[in-house]
Amino acid sequence: MTLTDTRQAHALGELAAFKARVDELVRTHPVVVDNRYTKWFATGHATRDEVRHLTVQFSVFSHLFVEAQLRKVINAADIESYRAGKEILMNELGVVFNGRADDDGISTEGTVDGSRYRHPAAHFEWLLRFARPLGLEFADLGKRRHGTPSTLFFCDELLRVYGSEDASTAEGASYAVENWAAAGFWKELIAGLSAFKERECPELHLGFWTWHDRVEDQHAAHTADELAEACAEPWFDEERFLTGAAEMLDGVAAFWTGLHSDRLGTAWRAA
Ligand SMILES: [Fe+2]
């Protein structure tokens, strides 16, 4: 073994050890192992009012997420992550990915570069179309004033942690969000919404939810590579990454425990 080989082997060993710490943190977080709201929702027993409440809170989070994503782009540490951030931002706003179209006719892969902007392709407009059969209109959705304290806590943590000026903190938050999102909550919501659609709302279109579920599976597959790249950067700080990941998961957890409390009629308080 040359000296370079030895150094590389050492770096790989350190990366594996760090990745194990990160994965332990994500895998054992209450929002990943025990999301009581989505578990319950998946049973399909939500009433129309409960589906409406989820829709409004989700619309506030997904609309305000755009703000956090823009902040992430502005604070990006290098041109690659700046561009990766813009892929997500522009897609949220209505620029479709140019990859192969899926069952719903909308691609989950490719790039926004050279692709077209379309008003109805904005994720928020997609959510508006989903919400219409529930009797919810533009003015009912996506504004900060529609958010409960727990939803707003989550949105503010996205701005602060996911959009952080500190690259290690922001990377930790991204890693946490992507791994949480791939852990199955979309599928639980889809299960509950499908049951509700079948029972009393056949005109409901679930495209917003099923598309995000499919795209998330791909995101998670990329996060291990991104972690390896981030670790090799001179600015990288393990502890700040872990703190960013933990704080972001606590923010995510607040959103769901808030919905859980709303359902049971109990008070929600920040942990
Ligand atoms: Fe989205």
Image (cartoon, rainbow, N blue to C red):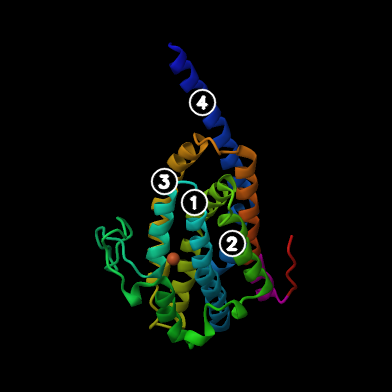
Is 94 contained in the magenta span? no
The three-letter amino acid code for the residue at tag 1 is Ala
The correct choice, above or below, for 164 with respect to 227 in the image is below
**C-alpha gap between disc 1 and disc 4:** 24 Å
What x and y, as percent, mark residue 235? 55, 39
Residue found 42% across the figure and 62% down from its top: 89
Disc 4 element: helix
**C-alpha gap between disc 2 and disc 4:** 32 Å
Q: Which mark is residue 76?
A: 1
Q: Is residue 56 left or right of residue 128?
A: right
**C-alpha gap between disc 3 and disc 4:** 20 Å
Q: Answer with the quarter of the image where residue 206 lies.
A: bottom left
Q: Answer with the quarter of the image where residue 146 lies.
A: bottom right
Q: Is residue 115 left or right of residue 190?
A: left
**C-alpha gap between disc 3 and disc 2:** 23 Å
N-terminal-most mark, 3 or 2: 2
Q: Which mark is residue 149?
A: none
Q: Which mark is residue 159?
A: 2
Question: Dot 2, crowdedness within 10 Å: few (<14), some or many (≥20)?
Answer: many
Q: Nearer the viewer, residue 243 or 188?
A: 243
Q: Nearer the viewer, residue 256 or 145?
A: 145
Residue with the mark numbered 3: 222
Segment tinted magenta in the rendering: 257-265
Disc 2 element: helix
Say whether mark 3 is within 8 Å of ligand 1. Answer: no
Q: Nearer the viewer, mark 2 or mark 4?
A: 2
N-terminal-most mark, 1 or 3: 1
Disc 3 element: helix
Q: Are marks 2 and 1 in contact (CB under 8 Å)?
A: no
The three-letter amino acid code for the residue at tag 4 is Ala
Question: Dot 4, crowdedness within 10 Å: few (<14), some or many (≥20)?
Answer: some
Residue with the mark numbered 4: 11
